[in-house]
Amino acid sequence: ITRGEGEGTLTAAIVNGRERIEPSRVVVEGRELVLGFDVYDSEIRAEVEGDALVGRWVHTMPGGPETLEFAARRGEQPRFVAKVEPPAHAVPASIDGDWSAVFTTPDGFTFAAQGVLASVGERVEATFLTDTGDFRWLDGRYEAGRLELSCFDGAHAFLLRADVDASGALQGGFWAMGGMHATWRATKMAAGDEGPLADPTAVVALSPEAADGRFEFAFPDLQGDLVTHDDPRFAGKVV
């Protein structure tokens, strides 16, 4: 958070590794500082308490507002500060590289992901690729066999923790938003491994009901005229 160019104005940026996200609103309302992420219909509201900001993050969701407590301390600091006690077994000095992971929710649902980890000085930058996307930029540390990663972008709040077990695998937990929790386990991928992700061309397909293998559509445009897949404008084009 810094002073803007105009008198009394403030600017802010959320930093996750090399990613910088600027809130759409940075204003003071009464005693509260408001960081608004309007495209996600969410905002942080916090009051100054000494050298700290203390408040809450509210994100409007289909089922109603979701709230997380929020706190921030002035000054540049590492994202994770608690001391890590080393385990009894040996752990690698670095965990850089690709990892094959499986996430499991409490109800037994599982999904595969490919972790991509890279050390940047004392920090670790990472993401987890899935069949339909990724976990965005993750920032954190690896110390004494423990990996800790997190991100916040106005729409998502992710936290991942894992320890290297005696077999060399990573085992830990994944928390998202206010209530989602999953456990996960990952093993280091060797050079040339195909990885755990599905063939992208097999993830999405036409439904069995699609006539003669084509995607069909019909809808009125802004003038009320019907637009369909058979319109001459689409002849010979990908629809």
Image (cartoon, rainbow, N blue to C red):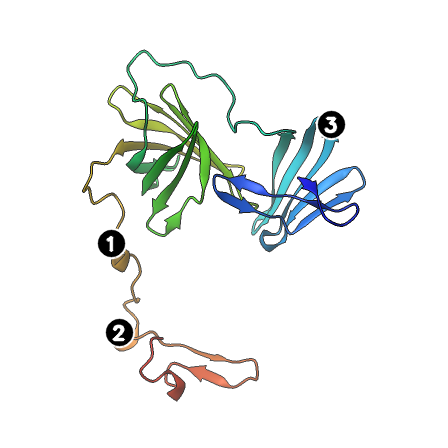
Left or right for 158, reference 86: right
Q: Which residue is mark 1?
A: 199
Mark 2 nearby-residue class (10 Å; few <14, some 14–19, many ≥20): few
Q: CA distance from mark 3 to mark 2?
A: 62 Å
Disc 1, SS: loop
Q: Exactly how many numbered labels are in the figure?
A: 3
Left or right, 2 with reference to 96:
right
- The residue carrying pointer 1 sits among few (fewer than 14), some (14 to 19) or many (20 or more) residues within 10 Å by Cα, namely few
Quadrant of the rendered structure where residue 76 is? top right
> Quick check: 75 left or right of 148?
right
Whole-percent x and y of residue 112? Answer: 30, 42
Q: Residue furthest bottom?
A: 232
Residue 45 sits above or below residue 49 on the image: below
Say which mark, if any, is on residue 213: 2
Tag 1: amino acid: Asp
Residue reaching furthest to the front: 5
Q: Which is more toward the observer, 182 or 191?
A: 191
Q: Is residue 6 visible?
A: yes
Q: Judging from the image, what secondary structure is the residue with disc 3 in?
A: strand
Q: Position of residue 96 (x, y in %)?
A: 32, 32
Marks 3 and 1, Cα distance to the nearest angstrom?
Answer: 51 Å
Three-letter code, disc 2: Gly
* Amino acid type shown at disc 3: Glu
Screen quadrant of the C terminus: bottom left
Helix, strand or loop status at disc 2: helix
Image quarter hosting the N terminus: top right
Disc number placed over residue 49 in the picture, else none: 3
The answer for how far apart the CA atoms under marks 2 and 1 are is 20 Å
